[in-house]
Image (spheres, rainbow, N blue to C red):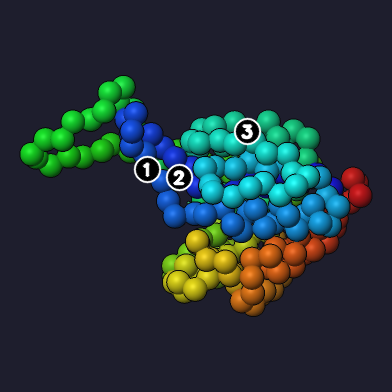
Amino acid sequence: MKFVITAGPTREPIDPVRFLSNRSSGKMGYAIAAAAIEANHEVLLISGPVNLAAPAGARLVSVITSDEMCAAVQEAVLDCDVLVMCAAVSDYKPARVAEQKIKKRDERFSLELIPACDILKSLPPSRNFFVVGFAAETNDVEEHARAKLATKNCDMMVANDLSDPNIGMESDENAVAIFSRSGESEEISRASKKIVARALVKKIRANAKKVLTKKF
Ligand code: CTP
């Protein structure tokens, strides 16, 4: 199968030297890319700025902003079987990017933010590829993940519980709960991201095969 996998954070510029971003390390997305290659899938990895080497065999598209990631995904899904949206895409971006460095002044400063492109929501509702979203939650994980599965029109939602500092963002380990559109759910208990990624790729492949019956 042809996998398109997004990973890492995006950066939203404020001025030539500053940006808004988040703590995503890209480790989970890169581990999924490596696991998909190991399972003989074709992989296009669309990555925000991270300190990781792309797994051998993956085609890498490097992006910085949410707009760049959005454009890269929209082009890549024209020819793919599975989209895994593991990237921590910014929800907001500055309304204006200052051309010159913003000077410090001895007064309050507010930054006006506008919604960034929601990549999952920008995808066509009727399509011939399988879509996996990630839900990063600090509370009411199942409720929020199931809601995102529906509102973001995904086939599968992988939920991360961010309230546990030992797993998820920046960590080498993860534990996830998977919710499918069919109503099924499954947990992958705490393990290295490499092990979790292998289990996820297996599950994604099996479910994608069921949904994409005409293709496989
Ligand atoms: N996502 C996206 N475009 C965005 C933000 C997120 O496509 N601008 C995708 C992520 O890659 C992930 C899913 O949406 O697969 C859920 O991301 P998450 O950050 O958990 O949810 P948000 O939609 O940002 O909602 P909230 O921050 O309110 O939890």
- Residue 133, horizontal then vertical, whole percent: 62, 54
Label 1: how many residues lie within 10 Å, few (<14), some (14-19) or many (20+)?
Answer: some
- Residue 107, horizontal then vertical, whole percent: 9, 40
Query: What secondary structure is marked by label 2?
Result: loop
- Residue 11, horizontal then vertical, whole percent: 44, 40
Above/below status of 38 relative to 185: above
Residue 60, quarter of picture = top right
- Residue under circle 1? 20
Q: Please, what is the three-letter code of the amino acid marked with disc 1?
A: Leu
Contact between marks 3 and 1 (CB within 8 A): the answer is no
Question: Does residue 116 appear in this view?
Answer: yes
- Residue under circle 2? 90
At x 26% / y 38%, what residue is drawn?
A: 111
Q: Is mark 2 within 8 Å of ligand 1?
A: yes
Residue 72's disc number: 3
Left or right side of 175 for 13: left
Above/below status of 24 relative to 110: below
Q: Please, what is the three-letter code of the amino acid marked with disc 2?
A: Ser
Dot 1 or dot 2, earlier in sequence: 1
Query: What secondary structure is marked by label 1?
Result: strand
Dot 3 or dot 1, earlier in sequence: 1
How many numbered discs, if any?
A: 3
At x 67% / y 58%, what residue is drawn?
A: 31
Q: CA distance from mark 3 to mark 1?
A: 20 Å
